Amino acid sequence: MWIFLQTIIDAPPVKRPIDEGWIKQIADGDMCALHQLYDAIYTNVYAFAYSLLRNQQDAEDVLQETFVRIHAHAKTYRPQGKPLAWIFTIARHLAQDKCRERAHIQPLEVLPPDDTHQLEHAEHRILLHALLNDLSEEDRQIVILHTAVGMKHREIAEVMNLPLNTVLSRHYRAIKKLRSIAEEEYK
Amino acid sequence: MTTKQCQHQLAIALAEWRPSTSFEDVAHAIQENRDIVSSIPTFPQRHRPVSRWLPLVAAACVIAIIGVGSLLFWRQGGSVPPVVDHVDTLVDIDVNPGIEISVGASDQVVAVEAVNADGRQVLEDLALQQQPLSDAVEVLFREMIEQGYIVGENNPVLVTVENADPSEADRIHGIINDGVDTVLSERNESEKSLSISVTNQTVEAFDAVKQFAHKHGISNGKAAFILSIVEQQPTLEADALADYTFAALAAIAQHQEIPLSELVDYDAEDGLWDLIVDDLVNEVQQAEATLGTSLLTPEKAKHLALEGLHNDWIAENALFVRVELEWKADVPMYRVEFVSLGYLYEYAISAVDGTFENPNSSTTTTGQSGTIRSTLQGGGTRTDIDTPPTKTTTTTTAPTAEGDGISDEQAKAIAFSRLDIEEQEASDIVVSRDRHSRYGDIVWVRFSYRETVYAYHLNKSSGDVLRTFCLSEDTPVEEFNIDEWDALEIALTQAGVQMDECGEQTIMFGVDKNQIPYIEVIFAVRSCSYYYRINGRDGSIITTTTAPLGSNHDAPPSLIVK
């Protein structure tokens, strides 16, 4: 109701895929709630981790460790209506730790074939490839957090410690670039 | 392909791009991890009095809440610890900055987390992890002094130490006190008036305390203090107290005639506030002897401060936090501070003749942690404290209706009156209510009138219009990447003002001749009006106008609503 625009547009507002109450349930030891949370966001966490690490195995490790951390630290979560910000902050820090572990710059990894064959539509593969290979690291994060995760620009700014204006302009430019690449590929 | 289509396709692609890791893998990893988690001791309950007086300029007592246990702990809002280390002791420090220190083996700091905005401000540039606790405490207190959270005399500080071993808890407590002493001894060489009052208290870190702390985002120590107050005075509302500073809580306890000795365990005979009052009486007597004349009493100074407000509602809700005597240009002045309805009021009153010292500087300044400080007519300042109680509003107007504030019908009448129309002329009318941590309790009225959608945010209690939104029904809203709140934040940031400083805000959506969507934001701060046109796609500022109120440039012609 706070978003005036969303109350007006015909399309439904961006769906928040997770229930903040799940985290409380996880804190109480409810593994079903953790499973629900996992099902709701695991693809997003994986994509986000991959966007930072560009390595399938590392991204899978971060995905797993993120949920282990969520389980371990759910008791310390303070409900502020920002569970996604909390979760992706964890994922981001873990990915950064993983980067430091590597201690060297990983060569750019192009999406392996077995990782993309599950995408049925060519346009999806094109967009994903462009997202991972043609955008800067921060732009990739912004696009994933906004487009896939559904986080508000303000929340992204908070998670990434960037000014709101920077997030907005980068997001706009990144989407414009992806559009341009996709349209060129379709020709 | 439109922007929306691009984002939609990308969202589908990302959702279909699945890793091979399954939930079973995660569950297995958690199971493996349980050995570590289960090794964390639980909180046995104990009740042990601890106290000692710090050799401070203004005498005070020491609070240390000795709970028990150790835990693996870090808090949301700060950084995620890179590795999971064992935590032997948890230390909470509440000044108004609330900071929690997890201490591991060899008294090394494992993690430091802020529990409120002021705490985050203090920790912003500090790297305390893996430092000895003694160093970390010194750094923290130096930083709080530097940032102005500890100023002058009698700065109440609540320190909580939780450890399963009582002797270990005492030892940690000693490290903290030594750290405070060290910092004070450094500072007092150049600033003799600085002192910190640390208070000792014994509580049990039982689940209710932790749940209450978790619910309100405060430290366990502060939670325990609040619950102890409410236990003594059940008419007080614990949830409402959660937003007060520790100093204000102590003042509330005094105001409610709850002896601090009932809340804390003392070796000393007197309580914190008794000592402060005794000190003040002594100081006044000394000042009278020096000047050879009688001075106003502290009670008279408090009375004058409230009288100067000319607002009975604020006065009735006032809780005094500080009354001190200080000298300015050989004139004894009372420094009077009280909290009321989410604001901290500060006065400097001559102890000789009761005149108010006029605050210098501009009429409004930004104080510590971004709070807004306003000069009051006739003297004194008012600061919007970071954490106003949820049960109060920031308006100084009495509520227009009992219970939940204005009714839906009243809200609609206010909104329609702004356009000077009757309800029958509008369509799609929606009235809603929202509570927001930053914007407070809002009644929200939305309707369509002459192909334009209007929305009004009204103060739930007073019915004042806080902000107005309007948007033509043919505006292509799908072209906007930012919403009204993004636009408002951008405009306020650009203007360098806080939300609380500006009056009613108007936010309008439109599309220019080049088909670029924009959001216009208009507001006034003091005697100046601000206008921003912001690109609805990327948040960049297209045009901006600032003009004195009352001039012909209050708003560009394009903002005139049909």
Image (tube, rainbow, N blue to C red):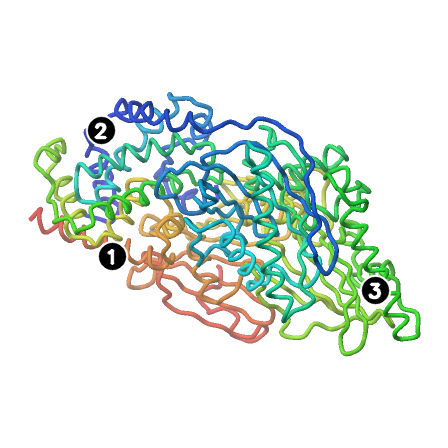
Residue that carries the numbered disc 2 in the rendered image: B21
Left or right, B167 with respect to B61, comes to left
Q: Residue furthest right?
A: B293
Task: Kindly report the distance in space between the C-alpha atoms of the residues bearing marks 2 and 3.
Answer: 71 Å
Residue B425 location, x and y as percent? 54, 46
Same-chain status of marks 2 and 1: no
Of circles 2 and 3, the one toward us is 3
Left or right, B17 with respect to A14, comes to left
Mark 1 chain = A
Residue A121 location, x and y as percent? 12, 35
Q: Nearer the viewer, residue A49 or A128?
A: A49
Q: Amino acid at mark 1?
A: Arg
Residue B535 location, x and y as percent? 35, 61
Residue that carries the numbered disc 3 in the rendered image: B283
| Local SS, label 3 | helix
Q: Amino acid at mark 2?
A: Thr
Mark 3, other Cα within 10 Å: few <14 / some 14–19 / many ≥20: some
Vertical comparison of B160 with B361: above or below: above
| Local SS, label 1 | helix
Query: Looking at the rendering, which quadrant does residue B72 occupy?
Result: top left
Vertical comparison of B156 with B520: above or below: above
Residue that carries the numbered disc 1 in the rendered image: A173
